[in-house]
Amino acid sequence: MIKSLSRKPGFAVAALAVAVATAAPAVSAQEELEEVIVTGSRIPVDSNAVSSVPIQAVSEEDIRNSGEINIADIVADIPALVSSLTAENSSTGANSLNLRGLGGSRTLTLVNGRRHVAGFRGSQAVDVGSIPRALVKSVEVTTGGASAVYGADAVTGVVNFILKDDFEGLQIDLSTGRPERGAGETTVLDIAWGTNFADGRGNAVLTVSAEDDGGILYGERSWSRNNGIATTLNNPDPNGAPRAVVNDPRYWLTSHEGSIAPGFGGRGDIYVDINGNGIADCQESEGG
């Protein structure tokens, strides 16, 4: 009897230990986390909320709905870029972005976050007309100074063109436009072909762009006729157009017949162009 009674307390202690062990996980599952630290996230956040300088973005849909043919004209609609150099307000035919009117060499232009080759001799300004419009996915404009990050050429800000890096297939875009007052018809054809390779790790793209700009003669607008008198239009800049197109040309130092003005030194034929229209230094003036 004594031996059998001594085993009962040992059995009771073992049963109690098993009960406590099985109940322990239930207590830990009810504990609440007081703090969660996120070291990385793929949740999209407005860049203006986390950036020290404001960023304005132009999406692919904005580009498509703008109706503009030139990518520079689309970006120039941003107030900080209104002083940019486009084909319409220059004689060079180039497109250079200019933030805050401080010059194209002080505006850094990037393509996919990398510097792009300059489009002007002796300057760091980029001719954005060399960027394939058909591949532009979006454009991000940093309108604040970023020289501390990118260098002195970004003192007014940064314009970053983001291109499609996984374009596949064939895309053909045909755009045409004409001013409300007539003349100046413009037609642009963009062709893009791309394919992926190496199981999607690589991508090859070929783009071709052709543009036909009819131009507008000075005489085709009342505010530019200037009574049929044309000033010197030849641009000596290396990037400039060596020939100008004018309508019904006259030069203020010549008669209406195009004769050479007397009384001036130097070569007399500097007042007559190759077409005999009496335009100084204008190598190709088309009379109307």
Image (cartoon, rainbow, N blue to C red):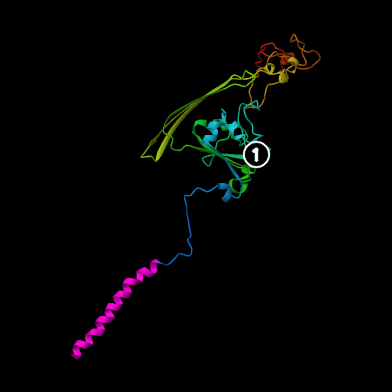
- Residue 4, compared with residue 62, is above or below; it is below
Crowd class of label 1 (few under 14; some 14 to 19; many from 20; radius 10 Å): many
Asked if one can make out residue 177 in the rendered structure from this viewpoint, the answer is: yes
Residue 153: x percent and y percent? 62, 42
Location of mark 1 (residue)? 80
Residue type at tag 1: Ala
- Residue 35, compared with residue 120, is above or below; it is below
Between residues 44 and 167, which one lies in front from this camera angle?
44
Q: Give the left or right position of residue 118, taking residue 197 as reference.
A: right
Residue 206: x percent and y percent? 45, 30
Q: Which quadrant of the figure has residue 26?
A: bottom left
- Residue 205, compared with residue 41, is above or below; it is above
Taking the spot 59% from the left edge, 33% from the top edge, the residue there is: 74
Q: Is residue 280 magenta?
A: no
| Secondary structure mainly formed by the magenta segment | helix
Segment colored magenta: 1-29
- Secondary structure at badge 1 equals helix
Q: Which residue appears farthest toward the bottom when viewing the image? A: 2
Asked if one can make out residue 127 in the rendered structure from this viewpoint, the answer is: no
Q: Is residue 19 magenta?
A: yes
